[in-house]
Image: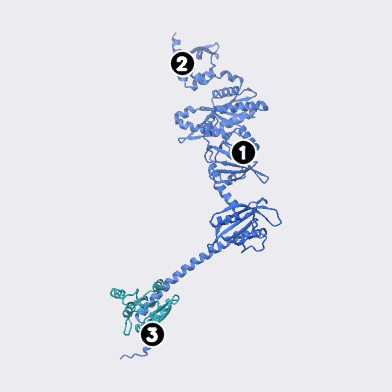
Amino acid sequence: MKKLLIVDDQVNIRRMICLALRDHFSTVEADNADSAYTMILAEPPTGIVLDVMMPGSMNGFQLCQRIKSDPALRAIHVVLITACGQVADQELGRSLGADAYFVKPFSPLALVQHLTRSCC
Amino acid sequence: MIEIVGATPELVDDVPPVDLKAQLYRYADDLTTLLDQHLHLEKSHSHLIESYQHLDASEATLQSLMLASRDVYLVTDLAGVIVHSNAVATERLACANPDGRQLFDLLPVADRSRLEALLAEGAQGLGSETRLVLNEVGGEASVLHVRVLPALRQLDGEALLHWLMYDESSGNPPLTVESNAALLAFQNAPIGITVTDMDGTILAVNHAVTRITGYTAEELLGRTPRVFSSGIQSKRFYQEFWQALKGDGFWQGSLFNRRKNGDIYSQWLTITVVREGGVTKMVAMLPEESPEPKAATSLNTHYDDLTRLPNRILFLERLSMAVSHALHSGQNLTLMYINLDGMKAINSKFGYKAGDSVLQNVAQCLREESQDQDTVARWGGDEFVVILPSLAGDANICLLARNLIGSLEMPMHLDGEKVRVGCSIGCAQLPADSRDGEALLIHAKAAMYAAKLQGGRRHALYTASDSRMHPTEPFESEALLEVAIAEDQFEVTYQPQFDLSGVSPYLTGVEAQVRWRQAEKSDMPAPTFVFVALRCGAVKPIGSWLLGIAACQVKT
């Protein structure tokens, strides 16, 4: 089973995502971008489900940029999730190299379908 | 003053943030979608389970049939390893449990390469069959008929081969696959096929027969091909037909059959007698269209185009045959000469087409009233002739004639009008009236004239006096009559008329009579003269001629 990293500051959202994905992936969780980055460096997952707005020194965009600009981590599939469903944010996400962009509230079915198609 | 009571930080924290709530609703949405899908899947799943149960049942039926078969039945994979076998196979291969063994190892055939070739063909998806000689230990060599059929196992789609084998010497052909194929071929052959026993009882007919004849299979089974009889073939035809079938076991030719709707049609027919296990059957092949143009030609020379009745030529042949048969066997024979009344009026009122359909109706009616051994023919124009072998006795003849007149008088519809066709019938008998066919015909015709002169719509038996008033040829007489008018061949005589009621005879007037003096013949008797005049519409011209002459002679 491939491993996915779920990054969101809200524990309930993380649980819901994990619940939707558990039949298809093994999941690990982080509640901010900094600890997520540490975990990625220690053991890179196949994909990452990444909330954009999070407390800490880095937000989701910045973590995404770090991953995609590092040749060793570039292959990680990055799915950005955010409440700000504006065109400018989506453009930004794409320019930073994100592989997909989901807007809250997102359909867990659609997320599962996307991830099983892209990462399995 | 506002007090906040019991509002703990934990409680405030428990109220989910807006985006979490929204996300929860999104989950609920997806859940509903999934539940719908689930119900749908469950439904189709139950259909699937149901149909699978049917499949199970039909497979079980098939298996039990195969297992109960008296032939060897085996299923192998493409390498010849036995997957499944029936009890007969166990016995025949002398192996208690042949499943999982190689077929080649168990079947002691003389020529193994042929069995391998059969397997190879089956593996290519081709059905095939062959005969193999078996060399059984301690037994005589026997011939095994082996048939292989490729098939797919239903569940996993693996290719399998079905093997059917039977001993040729046992005379037990496989009943399963082959007879199904034969039945399909029989039912759907583009040629009509009937199978009858030697008494003619119909045992089987295929679809083409029902198409050709218009009868359903149910209407034909158990009956005889006589339901197709058109009545056109003579008794002698059928005698030769049966002679050929009993002698040669084969008959081929053309005959006239009748469809359920009454249509008469020409049928090319090939009949073969088949002997099978002590039982003899006849198989008749009926092509849907006659392949032989000759048949149509012979129809035209012997049958009347309009009514499909035998024509004058065939009638005369039949008559001479019937006469010689009657004389030879000492039986009686009656000849009827039928002339329709009033056809001229019908033709001029409704047209010749209508007249033709009246003639067809009459022909049909005569056919229906006659029996197999009778011959109904069209003599020409509105005249028909009927040969009635073995009909004898004035009373019987009169009864039949009256019936014929009655059934012809059934009204027919022309242009929405009811039309009744009357007829006059003359009857002559063999041997009472003559022992010669031609003479019988002339006598019957004379009797017909007699009936006509009595007003028509009646019949008359020939009496010797009829021949006196019979003109040699009516058509000839009609021509002569025209000449007679032109050449003044009529002679008028006068007969005084006296009134005898008083004391002394009293002259009331004279009756003018016209006689026809023909140069080389004696006077034509008055009734014949009147008949011929009536027939060719010459009554009026003769009448005015007579008036003119009489008027002239009164003056002189």
B212 lies above or below B424: below
* Residue positioned 58% across, 49% down in the render: B182
Q: Is residue A113 left or right of residue B315?
A: left
Of discs 1 and 2, which sits in the foreground?
A: 1
Residue type at numbered disc 3: Asp
Residue to which mark 1 is pinned? B250
Chain bearing tag 2 is: B
Which is nearer the N-term, disc 3 or disc 2? 3
Pointer 3 chain? B
Q: Contact (CB < 8 A) between labels 1 and 2?
A: no
Amino acid type, mark 2: Ile
Of label 3 and label 1, which has the lower sequence position?
Answer: 3
Q: CA distance from mark 3 to mark 2?
A: 137 Å
Q: Colour of chain B?
A: blue
Is label 3 or label 1 in front? 1
Residue B14 tag number: 3
In the depicted view, which residue is nearer to us: B226 or B55? B55
In the figure, the shade used to draw chain A is cyan
Q: Nearer the viewer, residue B382 or B394?
A: B382
Q: Mark 1, chain letter?
A: B
Q: Amino acid at mark 1?
A: Phe
Q: Are marks 3 and 1 in contact (CB under 8 Å)?
A: no
Foreground residue among B90 and B273: B90
| Colouring scheme, one of rainbow, by chain, secondary structure, one colour | by chain
| Residue B517 rendering spot, x and y as whole percentages | 51, 13
Q: Quadrant of residue B466?
A: top right
